[in-house]
Image: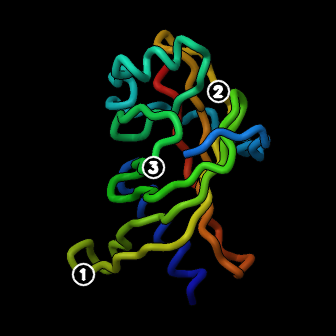
Amino acid sequence: MRALVLAALLLALLGAGCGADTERAAAPAPEAPRDIDPTVAAREARPDAATAARLEAGEVALVDLQGAIGIRPRTLEFAKGGRMEDVTWGAWTDTGAEGRGTMVGLVCDPSCAQGTKLSVPATIVLGEPVACPAGRFFDRARIEVSSSDPDAPSTSWLAAPC
């Protein structure tokens, strides 16, 4: 039953809106469908001065669906009503990153007003950095909920702002 609820959460979130330094390499994010485009907010996002300086120095950033640009962000939006909170990054390199936190969202069944709020442990894996005019950004993200159930499918994708 928990796997069904977790799968429903991810489907609902995806349908709705579609740290510390380390030397350890992050696991690569899997190949995503190539028809994923950045949101308007992501395309229009601009880094603040401090982040722009870090990008200029060669660091890689993430832009979430709301257009927030971050390097090792503690919180990020990946769907309308879906976000990762309290993310602790175990790895962040120029080729990939991996962090753990809490996925928070709302399963709108039978409606959003009567839906169920969920908060579950999850892992986010970033990969495929691309060069954009403002700097390098991870172009793919996979979010997996922690579950002992092997049938708990749970992935989500983000795209770089360019």
Which class describes the residues within 10 Å of circle 2: few (<14), some (14-19), or many (20+)? many
Image spot of residue 92 (x, y percent): 66, 38
- Please provide percent x and percent y for residue 37: 49, 31
Q: Which mark is residue 41?
A: none
Marks 3 and 2: which is nearer the front? 3
**Numbered tag placed on residue 74 in the rendering:** 3
Secondary structure of the residue carrying numbered label 3 = loop
Q: With 139 as the anchor, is 37 left or right in this view?
A: left
Q: State the CA–CA distance, disc 3 to disc 2.
A: 19 Å
Q: Which mark is residue 129?
A: 2
The residue shown at (33%, 40%) is 66
Q: Nearer the viewer, residue 74 or 82?
A: 74
Which colouring convention does the figure follow?
rainbow
CA separation in Å, label 2 and label 1 = 39 Å
Q: Depth check: 106 or 124 in front?
A: 124
Q: Which residue is mark 1?
A: 114
Corner quadrant of residue 108: bottom left
69 relative position to 137: left or right: left
Residue 80: image location, x then y, percent? 34, 53
Look at discs 1 and 3 and give the one toward the viewer. 3
Of callouts 2 and 1, the N-terminal one = 1
In the rendered structure, which amino acid carries the disc numbered 3? Arg
Can you give x and y, in whole percent of width and height, for residue 58 in the image? 61, 16
- Residue 19 lies in what quarter of the image? top right
Residue at x 68%, y 31% (from the top left corner) = 128
